[in-house]
Image (spheres, rainbow, N blue to C red):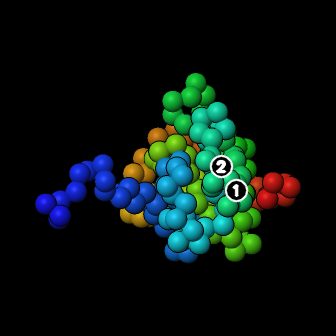
């Protein structure tokens, strides 16, 4: 009987945190309080949330320990699609923190649409991947990746038309 434990006494499952770029950029769902040791173990310094505060507030123990930045983006359940300028802002925030050598954990609600999409746009713009290569890479390193066709079109427009720029915002 000593070997078997009641399922409520099992330790919490490890959260689904995946490296997009080893030691630099991690991705997953909206973090919960029990993510703290996993994020610390990966030496994450910045949490980039693509959710609005109303959609998913960050637990206080995370906002106390990490630099937390929000760049809310609509997902496929919103009444409107993401705008290129919104995507550009999220990519700029990500790029700026990575340039500063601050490992980033990027998330949306489930880590399926918005956060993989921002990673794809970043990989294309700043790591010289083409769109298909970046989409395949994301599906490989983060299997839940499932951006919608309309979202991929926003990335294409961003790559073809958005200028390289940084948002040197005080939040960073």
Whether the residues at callouts 1 and 2 have beta carbons within 8 Å, the answer is yes
User: From where the camera sits, is residue 126 visible?
Assistant: no
In the image, what residue occupies the spot 30% across and 49% down? 8
Quarter of the image that includes the N terminus: bottom left
Quarter of the image that includes the C terminus: bottom right
Give the Cα distance between marks 1 and 2.
6 Å
Secondary element at tag 1: helix
The label shown at residue 64 is: 1
Q: Where in the figure is residue 130, as x and y percent of width and height?
A: 53, 63
In the image, what residue occupies the spot 55% across and 37% down? 75
Which class describes the residues within 10 Å of circle 2: few (<14), some (14-19), or many (20+)?
A: few
Question: Residue furthest toward the top?
Answer: 79
Nearest the viewer among 139 and 172 is 172
Which class describes the residues within 10 Å of circle 1: few (<14), some (14-19), or many (20+)?
A: few
The residue at which mark 2 appears reads as 60
Q: Is residue 53 left or right of residue 28?
A: right
Where 71 sits versus 24, above or below? above
Question: Residue furthest toward the left?
Answer: 1
Nearest the viewer among 162 and 58 is 58
Q: Is residue 169 left or right of residue 118?
A: right
Nearest the viewer among 46 and 148 is 46
In the image, what residue occupies the spot 63% across and 55% down? 62
């Amino acid at each position: 009987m000593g070997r078997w434990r009641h399922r409520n006494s099992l330790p919490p499952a490890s959260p689904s945190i995946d490296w997009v770029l080893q030691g630099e950029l991690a991705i997953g769902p909206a973090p919960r309080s029990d993510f703290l040791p996993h994020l610390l173990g990966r030496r994450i310094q910045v949490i980039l949330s693509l959710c609005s505060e109303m959609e998913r507030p960050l637990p206080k123990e995370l906002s106390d320990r990490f630099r937390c930045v929000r760049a809310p983006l609509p997902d496929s359940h919103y009444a409107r699609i993401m705008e290129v300028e919104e995507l550009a802002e999220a990519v700029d925030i990500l790029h700026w923190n990575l340039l500063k050598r601050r490992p980033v954990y990027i998330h949306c609600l489930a880590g399926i649409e918005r956060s993989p999409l921002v990673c794809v746009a970043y990989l294309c713009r700043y790591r010289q991947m083409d769109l298909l290569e970046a989409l395949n890479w994301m599906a490989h390193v983060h299997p839940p990746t499932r951006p919608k066709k309309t979202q991929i079109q926003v990335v294409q427009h961003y790559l073809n038309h958005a200028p390289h720029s940084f948002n040197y915002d005080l939040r960073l």
